Image (cartoon, helix red, strand yellow):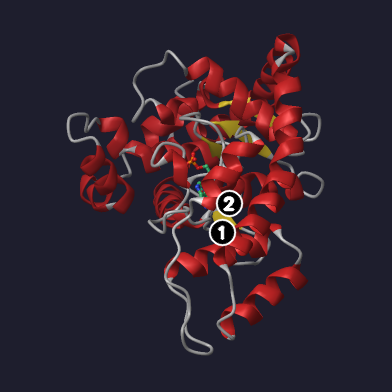
Amino acid sequence: MSGIRPTGFLHLGNYFGAVKNYVRMQDEYDCFFMVADLHSLTTHPDTRELKQHVRRVLAENIACGLDPEKVALYCQSHVHETGELYLYLNMLAYKGELEKTPTFKEKVRLQPDNVNAGLLTYPVLQTADIIIHRAKLVPVGKDQEQHLEMARNFVNRFNHRYGEVFPEPFAFNFGETLAKVPSLDGSGKMSKSENQMATVYLSDDDDRIRKKIMGATTDQGPTKLNSPKSVYIENLFLLMRLFSDPTIVDQFEIEYNNCTVRYGDLKKQLAEDVVAFVRPIREKTNAILEDEKYLADIMEKGAEKARNSARQTMQLVREAIGLQYY
Ligand code: AMP
């Protein structure tokens, strides 16, 4: 089980941190993937663009290879049972631990005028989203690791107090370390809403991708043999390893180590490889978005599958808590 907030269009970080693994998991596992529209309300209360973003996130997931026949692909707000589970879990989550969460602190810094309770209890709702399907594996990027740890704490508290209902959920990346796709300006990770020129979106056209990558921050270049790389150059090589032919990346490594590397050539190569990767996804997304009925049908079918699973879990939860009086 996993989800993506419709707070903007998807980018390369969302692809490598999340969607790529959704696609890999769909043949082997019973999967639930959602557009986390309720989570987006904690930071984006203005809903004028919400519908457009929800549809695009769905279309982009499908364009990346997710098959709505194989998985439950749905919107978070269509599964009302999650709200009930969130309420029960809130009684097991403590103010102190929620206030200490680094993502909460970061959001308080970014939006000091809207420190709402939903923001504070974000990890609780996220836990409810996961365990409403009693999911064990959660394909996410590195930034979500701590939230998964909190989810395990809430699960253990619930099980301890009311009996074993939920398995512990773990962040999942097919046994590899969780992905973190860096931004092009060397300051943290690609993200939907911060510095848009440092993030490559799956909706960017060819020229925009080239412009962003050619504008990526570099340094003066190596002057000593085999010198360590600055974070900017490390990031460019990391991106290259995701998109470019390994023999070409090895060649640039050799040139870096013997001080003959030309960053302009490296960025040109990377830009063309990213363009070739993004173009078919963008074209497929645009074609899917043309068909309103198709997307509506997918949302309806996905919600039905997710609700069926949620209803079964909530039956167990109410029994375990002792909320059945007749
Ligand atoms: P969000 O965009 O915050 O709703 O995140 C949706 C999914 O994408 C989560 O699984 C995140 O961990 C993942 N993700 C977002 N940004 C990145 C990034 N730059 N690198 C790797 N994974 C990411």
Q: Is mark 1 within 8 Å of ligand 1?
A: yes
Residue at the location (38% across, 41% down)? Answer: 194
**Number of callouts:** 2
**On the rendered image, what quadrant is the N terminus found in?**
top right
Does residue 303 appear to the left or right of 214 in the view shown?
A: right
Taking the image as shown, residue 123 lies to the left or right of residue 252, namely: left
> From what the image shows, is residue 143 above or below residue 191?
below
48 on left or right of 292 = left
**Residue type, mark 2 in image:** Gly
Question: Which of the labelled discs sits on residue 179, or is there none?
Answer: 1
Q: Residue at x 56, y 61 (%)?
A: 178
Q: What residue type is labelled 1?
A: Ala
> Extreme bottom residue here?
225
User: Residue drawn 48% across and 50% down?
Assistant: 215
- Alpha carbon of mark 2 to alpha carbon of mark 1: how far? 5 Å
Residue at the spot 80% in from the left edge and 50% down from the top edge? 28
Relative placement, left or right, of 232 versus 290 is left
- In this view, 135 is above or below 70: below
> What residue does disc 2 label?
17
Q: Nearer the viewer, residue 270 or 179?
A: 270
Give the quadrant of residue 108.
top left
| Disc 2 residue lies near ligand 1 with CB under 8 A | yes
Rendered image: mark on residue 263:
none
Secondary structure found at label 1: loop
Which residue is situated farthest in the top direction here?
293
